[in-house]
Image (cartoon, rainbow, N blue to C red):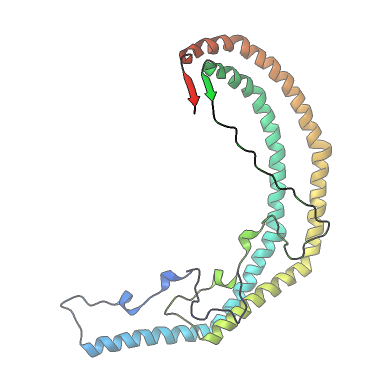
């Protein structure tokens, strides 16, 4: 969750441990084993030079480039968010609708040919007796959904369609312990990241959002028209034809396989299951 500038933690700059793998101390790089020790002053000064060089170089680089890079990543994630919200998620919805229609067609055909066969093969276990003394489960109370006549201007993604592109500053940039930039650089990077992300996203939606929303509205209207007036009646015709075929096919399967499966079911006739 994003913070205000005053609430920005200047001590713990990597709360999500994004860059804990680059947290480097002097003892993580240099180590003298027993019997190979340098002069004490050399080792102490090496320690000071290592930390001084690392800290000064990192602060110099972040002072020169950190704010600009934060601004760039803010704009980058704004464009990614724009693509997912206005393009990819509606396309996935179109795919889900098309696959739903295909699933109905495929399910009708599978039911036609496999249901009689599976039902007949189920006679193998027709001699198994099961007695259940457990109490029936208590049905869950379903909460009723209330209709909201207006549009919610605060909660704009109630179904969490684009929850995966929710990006905050601390989800992208994090400085591990021992590698902190100057406080003003970190604060301004935070401001530039959020400013770039928000401004870039608002700019893109202002330019394209209304037209894209109009396009997707027309697109889903045409998809709805196709499904209501073409695909659903066609699936109904297919279901009727497959139902007739299923009865004929089921009659033949029952005639030849049912006696065989029912007789083989005698193998399990002595099995009894009781639940207490």
Task: Say left or right for 199 vs 33.
Answer: right
Between 104 and 61, the residue placed more toward the observer is: 104
Instruction: Residue at 81% x, 63% y: name it.
Output: 210
Location of the N terminus (image quadrant): bottom right
Instruction: Residue at 74% x, 27% y: name it.
Output: 239
Horizontal and vertical percent position of residue 58: 46, 83
Between 12 and 22, the residue placed more toward the observer is: 12
Asked which quadrant contains residue 138, the reply is top right
Up-down relation of residue 43 to residue 83 (above or below): below
Horizontal and vertical percent position of residue 234: 79, 32
Horizontal and vertical percent position of residue 190: 59, 78
Task: Say left or right for 115 vs 37.
Answer: right
Task: Say left or right for 26 vs 197.
Answer: left
> Which residue reaches farthest left?
35
Up-down relation of residue 46 to residue 72 (above or below): below
Instruction: Residue at 68% x, 36% y: name it.
Output: 103
Q: For the image shown, how many numbered marks are present on the structure?
A: 0
Horizontal and vertical percent position of residue 151: 80, 60
């Amino acid at each position: 969750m994003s913070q205000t500038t005053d609430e920005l933690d200047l001590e713990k700059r990597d709360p999500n441990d994004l860059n804990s793998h680059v947290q480097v101390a002097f003892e993580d790089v240099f180590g003298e084993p027993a019997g190979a020790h340098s002069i004490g002053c050399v080792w102490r000064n090496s320690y000071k030079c290592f930390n001084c060089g690392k800290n000064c170089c990192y602060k110099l680089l972040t002072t020169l480039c950190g704010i600009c890079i934060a601004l760039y990543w803010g704009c980058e994630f704004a464009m990614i968010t724009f693509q997912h919200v206005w393009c990819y998620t509606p396309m996935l919805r179109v795919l889900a609708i098309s696959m739903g229609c295909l699933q109905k067609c495929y399910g009708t055909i599978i039911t036609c040919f496999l249901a009689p066969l599976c039902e007949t093969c189920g006679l193998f276990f027709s001699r198994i007796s099961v007695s259940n003394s457990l109490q029936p489960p208590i049905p869950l109370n379903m909460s009723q959904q209330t209709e909201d006549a207006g549009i919610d201007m605060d909660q704009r993604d109630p179904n969490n369609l684009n929850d995966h592109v929710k990006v905050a500053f601390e989800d992208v940039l994090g400085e591990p312990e021992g590698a902190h930039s100057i406080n003003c650089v970190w604060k301004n990077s935070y401001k530039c990241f959020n400013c770039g992300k928000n401004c870039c996203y608002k700019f893109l939606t202002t330019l394209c959002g209304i037209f894209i929303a109009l396009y997707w509205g027309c697109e889903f209207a045409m998809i709805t028209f196709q499904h209501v007036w073409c695909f659903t009646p066609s699936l109904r015709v297919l279901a009727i034809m497959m139902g007739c075929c299923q009865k004929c096919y089921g009659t033949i399967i029952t005639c030849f396989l049912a006696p065989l499966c029912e007789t083989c079911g005698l193998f399990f006739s002595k099995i009894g299951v009781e639940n207490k």
